[in-house]
Image (cartoon, helix red, strand yellow):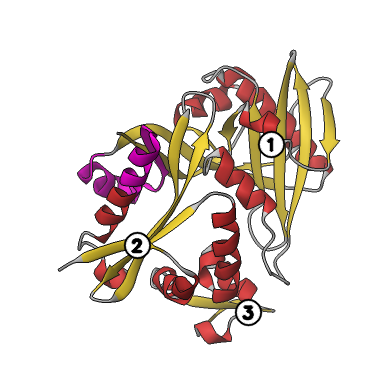
Amino acid sequence: MMIIIREATIDDVEKIVEIHKSDVKKWYKIEDNGLVEANYDELSIDERWLHGGQWMSKETYLHHFRNFTSWGGKILVAVLNGEVVGEIEFIDVEEPEPYGEHVSVYVLMIHQRVRGMGVGKELMKAVEKCAKEKGVKKILVNSEERSLGFYRKIGYGIFEAYTSIEIKINTENIGDIGSLHYEPLTGIDETAVYARRLIVGRFLDTKSTLYNIKIKFPLTELSLKFFYFKLFDNHCTHFIVFRKSNMINHSLYSWLDIKYGDWETMSNVIKSALSIGEKIGLDKVLTCVPSRSLDRLRKNGVKFKEIEKIPIFVKYL
């Protein structure tokens, strides 16, 4: 069995979509009485998106393919017996420590029927080769707990553990935060956020998060609106972004102008962000924070529901 890794082309778009579709067991259509099981062909582009994002239809993935590569991202595919059965997307990133300069894996997906055959390992080896050729010494991957065995098997360890949490925006959570000094913005200052640490809402690295915020996809029913704020706190300036949606979770991201590990300030920024979120009509937000900061959040009076662990895997080259 020979697995060939090559750079993806436009001709691979439909095959890559099929790889991601293989991970979905059931498809659902939105009707007046809720979600109804349906065939893939019955779904709108927006309904397909709800099952896994831009990879779920040709129209949105083609848009992503062109934009991701224009941002400096790279897409590789794995070919087995002449068929495209896996893909990986990655991008070069440079952030403040502890993340530093690294290659970040944006997505890795293997067709369901060939998992366990070494396809994912070969794709990761190809990414490592690309990183070494550029002189980058570190690969980081935001993934899921279920992938722990796979990454350990190919030489990766846990770099940082994050936990996604849902926070209700109410008086109990906001509490008395005193005078709130903030400024609405029309967009995100990329230079400013690259100089700060994305600690709240680090589902992905800074560059990938900015990509997700800035790229507009051809959707008609699903609304994704972003609100930007600069928060002034104790001689520091932080940046807050909310994603407000009519069909999926509202999300919170924050780039903090603090030393990594300052959980007290992080808690205060989150409470301030919740107060701002209330003003733009949000009732709850989904975000993620370092797992070791959860107790500090609770001690500071932030009540939340833990959703899932998001381990960040690392390999030093």
Q: Is residue 58 left or right of residue 107?
A: right
Callouts 2 and 3 close, C-beta under 8 Å: no
Considering only vertical position in the picture, is 257 above or below 215? above
Residue tagged by mark 3? 44
Residue at the far top in the pictured view: 235
Q: CA distance from mark 2 to mark 3?
A: 32 Å
Considering only vertical position in the picture, is 55 above or below 273? below
Please rate how many residues cluster around mark 2, counting C-alpha atoms within 10 Å: few if below 14, some from 14 to 19, many from 20: some
Q: Residue at x 82, y 24 (%)?
A: 180
Residue 55 lies, in percent from the top left, at 51, 66
Residue 16 sits in which quadrant?
Answer: bottom left
Give me the disc on residue 6.
2
The C terminus, quarter of image: top left
Magenta range is: 127-155
Whichever of labels 2 and 3 marks the residue nearer the N terminus, that label is: 2
Q: CA distance from mark 2 to mark 1?
A: 32 Å
Question: Is 298 part of what is drawn in magenta?
Answer: no
Q: Residue at x 25, y 53 (%)?
A: 121
**Type of amino acid at the residue the image marks with label 3:** Ser
| Callout 3 secondary element | loop
| Callout 2 secondary element | strand
Give me the disc on residue 190.
1
The N terminus, quarter of image: bottom left
Look at the image and tell me whether residue 173 can be seen. no
Please rate how many residues cluster around mark 3, counting C-alpha atoms within 10 Å: few if below 14, some from 14 to 19, many from 20: some
Considering only vertical position in the picture, is 30 above or below 75? below
Q: Nearer the viewer, residue 194 or 147?
A: 194
